Amino acid sequence: MTDSFVITGDIPAMWLRDSTNQVLPYIPFANQDAGLQELVCGLIRRQARQVSTNRYANAFNMDPSPAGHHTDTVTTQPQVCWGQSGYVYENKYELDSLVNVLQLSNQYYNSTKDMSCFQGDPTWLSAVTDILETLRVQQVGTDESFTDPPYTFQRLTEVWTDTLMNRGHGAPGRRTGMSKTYFRPSDDASTFPFNVAANAFAVVQLRRLGEPGAVLAQLNHTLAREARALADEIDAGIHAHGIVHPAGGRPYFAYEVDGFGSCYFMDDANIPSLLSLPYLGYVSKDDPVYLETRRRLLSTEKNPWYFEGTAGKGIGGPHQGTGMIWPMAVIMQALTSRDESEISACLEMLESTHADMFYMHESFNKDDQFHFTRPWFSWANSLFGELMLTLAHERPHLIFSS
């Protein structure tokens, strides 16, 4: 059987999240190309094996290797000797990593109806079982699991977002119905443990996974029902705890909450983000709570990680710091916009900020496009390709001359 390993670009390791998003734009064409179908099937199998190796890891080596972060102090339940195997590159638990595994399987099957990736080998079903179990385990409050935690992480570092406070447990959280994540899609530590966008992403993919006729329902009806029930619990948690209702103002989504009443409003360029909620399928583009959230996100007065300068404007994040705009966020702004003038402005910005390299970078300085990070960030390039395909289908006049 084919095995596919998709590196993230200029880092020769495979992230669960990145690898899914790097191939998503190609999946609609899989039925037309047997080689492409084989590649995606190989990636689904590889991801399943990776989850079975360590469900809390975010990035992996192709073969056993000393590469990666093997000096971190990590505990997991179930216990694994994650550093000894050499397959794990990094062991930061990010809810969206596991959800991206589900997304790849969901979208591939929905596009091709090909069961060959999922049958004949129990690894995929075992990985899905591990994912559902992990999301449930991470619904618990910190006080419920502090003496016997399912996951702790500590790293000796000068970068505060690369380790967890509270002896590796992270910030305390009270049970909400949502599932905790200790690190964000940017690989940065969470401020509060319940990331609303990541949980919204989980709701969408769990429901798709559990649909009658979906691949999981054909293999295990009990797990499919469990996926739907878990999605409903998380969704209820988002509505109860993840929406801010300001006095005299319009409600909006928080970025992170702790279940004790505290919330943090910001956004991060990496997906899932609050800006990406319609793209993820959680809300429509004209949902009133989303529109108020979007208005705040694209504002230097409300979002501490939104920047405007002479080179461009857009959302960045703590990962590269103040003043650094991520093309990924500009692309997502275009993908979720209903305004053609806004979409055109995003396209012009992307065209003028690639530093004459004709690639999407990880980030660029708001005042200088030639001050950028990561010359080869494959996920951003795939997302740009998805934007072009979307516009070619929905608004061709914006990218094709008459």
Image: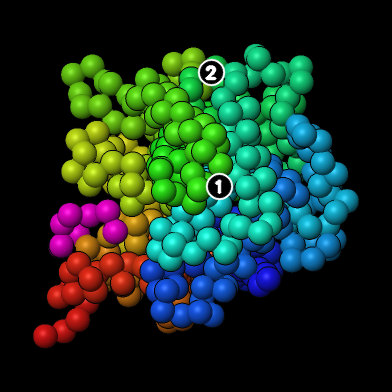
Q: Position of residue 221 (x, y in %)?
A: 52, 38
Give coordinates of residue 47: x percent, y percent.
64, 57
In this view, 39 is above or below 21: below
- Residue 234, compared with residue 97, is above or below; it is above
* Residue that mark 2 sits on: 175
Range shown magenta: 335-342
Numbered disc 1: secondary structure: helix
**Viewer-side residue, 166 vs 222:** 222
Label 2 Cα neighbours within 10 Å, binned few <14 / some 14-19 / many ≥20: some
Can residue 130 be seen here? The reply is yes
User: Residue at coordinates 28% horizontally, 67% vertically from top-left?
Assistant: 390
Q: Amino acid at mark 1?
A: Leu
Mark 2–mark 1 Cα distance, whole angstroms, equals: 31 Å
Using the image, determine if residue 182 lies above or below residue 115: above
Mark 2: which secondary structure? Answer: loop
Q: Residue at x 18, y 74 (%)?
A: 396
Mark 1 = which residue?
219
Task: Compare residues 358 and 116 and report the one nearer the observer.
Answer: 116
